[in-house]
Amino acid sequence: MLCPMLPVDPEKPSLVSRFTRITTSGRFIPQIDGLRFIAIAVVVLYHMAHCMADWHKGYAYRAPIHEDWLYRISRHGHYGVQLFFIISGFILALPFAAHRLHSGKKVSLKAYFWRRITRLEPPYILCMLFFFALALVARPNSLVGMSVGDLLSHLGASLIYLHNVVFAEQPVLNIVAWSLEIEIQFYLLVPLLTVVFLIPHRMVRRGVLIAACVIAVALQRWLVPDGKGVATLTIAMYIQFFLMGFLLADIYLVDWRQGLPTTSGLFDVSSLICATALLVLCELTAGAGYQSGWGIATDFAFPLLLVVFCIGIFRGRLCSRLFSLPWITAIGGMCYTIYLLHLNFMLAFGKVGQKLPHVKWFGGDVLFQLAVFLPILAIACAAYFLLIERPCMDKNWPQKLMAKLRSKPKVELAEPATARVAE
């Protein structure tokens, strides 16, 4: 059977409960939403730092970029996408693995694919249509010179998740959608990839996953040594992170079958060590280059370090509590909406950001800009989440909508007025 998950707390404040994700089973794993929070936070910080670097023509803050400690950290925030890939691998592997490891309910492929469509497509399609309409009205610099036909072709490719492949570049209407196209490729492969859970022996099964991860990185380094080209925008360059999500699901279902074991401060330390190691490897790779020995070491070490980091979030005495806090999990549960909207809103905010005063102390500029920008983003994302994404989390929303459309309101005819006859 599927291992226990923590139920939604009915005693949560009403405001928090309004932003709590609706899950298919009615239960959720709070630490996963905590990991989502970490992933979206570092991605937003990354884009803010790089937008500011562009706004100030090579100077993100008062100090040169290479001297600013916050920029040096935030410039590696794009690895939050890889953390999202691990989370996706974990979440999607759970029902397949539970069926094969614990004789759980068999996964209906029809229901599996239909759920992906009803859950993800409406927010994505409406978002892309919105940005397309904005592009027609006010062309950003990146789209100047494009005809309406060009924009329509880019929109069409994005709507069927083929922009990366067709145009060999990130989607122009919403750059961040490049990773969503890779996610879709993974969703299609999940039923095939999860045959790994048919391997009965635990250590053999995990050995296969780790070996597949190592082989994938080796092939990437061999076939795409410069890290460039259309292949870098496909699952071929990121499959190892999804497989590490499978490994995390295996540990969760088998080792923690009866619920999370006792938390320990040692796991907090392990998460901190992994986070530090990841940051150091990123810094060394940034200095030496992608093709350097440090770049190769980073590619091989990164997936496993991220898994150990995730385990620390689950098992750490401090981390498991911190990243299970209601507002942390609520923001993490909104990550899809935030991811879809944040960069284009940030780019639009650039004209305002350029006029804001500088804050002299190191790191002050980006924090000041975030303090101004985040409330704007929060309002937009909260509205989009409540109106569009959260209703789509209800797996039965299509049936409810159809039933509502089919039902005709009864119109009661008023009785004709009659004169009152005096007796």
Image (cartoon, rainbow, N blue to C red):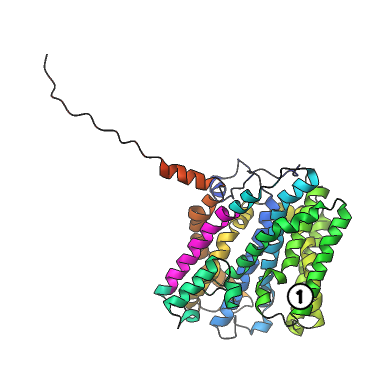
Q: Could you say which quadrant of the image residue 313 lies in?
A: bottom right
Q: Quadrant of the C terminus?
A: top left
Q: Residues within 10 Å of mark 1 (few under 14, many from 20)?
A: some
Of residues 130 and 322, the one drawn nearer to the viewer in this rendering: 130
In screen coordinates, is 253 left or right of 152?
right
Q: Nearer the viewer, residue 201 or 314?
A: 201
Residue 208's x, y, as percent?
Answer: 84, 61
Image quadrant assignment for residue 121 = bottom right
The part of the chain drawn in magenta is 116-135
The stretch drawn in magenta includes residue 283: no
Left or right side of 387 for 73: right
Relative image position of residue 270 (x, y in whole percent): 81, 61
From the top left corner, tell me how far across and down residue 182 is, in percent: 64, 67
Badge count: 1
Residue designated by label 1: 220
Q: Nearer the viewer, residue 61 or 122?
A: 122
Q: Examine the residues drawn in magenta and state their main secondary structure.
A: helix
Is the N terminus in the top left, top right, bottom left or bottom right quadrant? top right
Residue depicted at x 67% and y 56%: 34
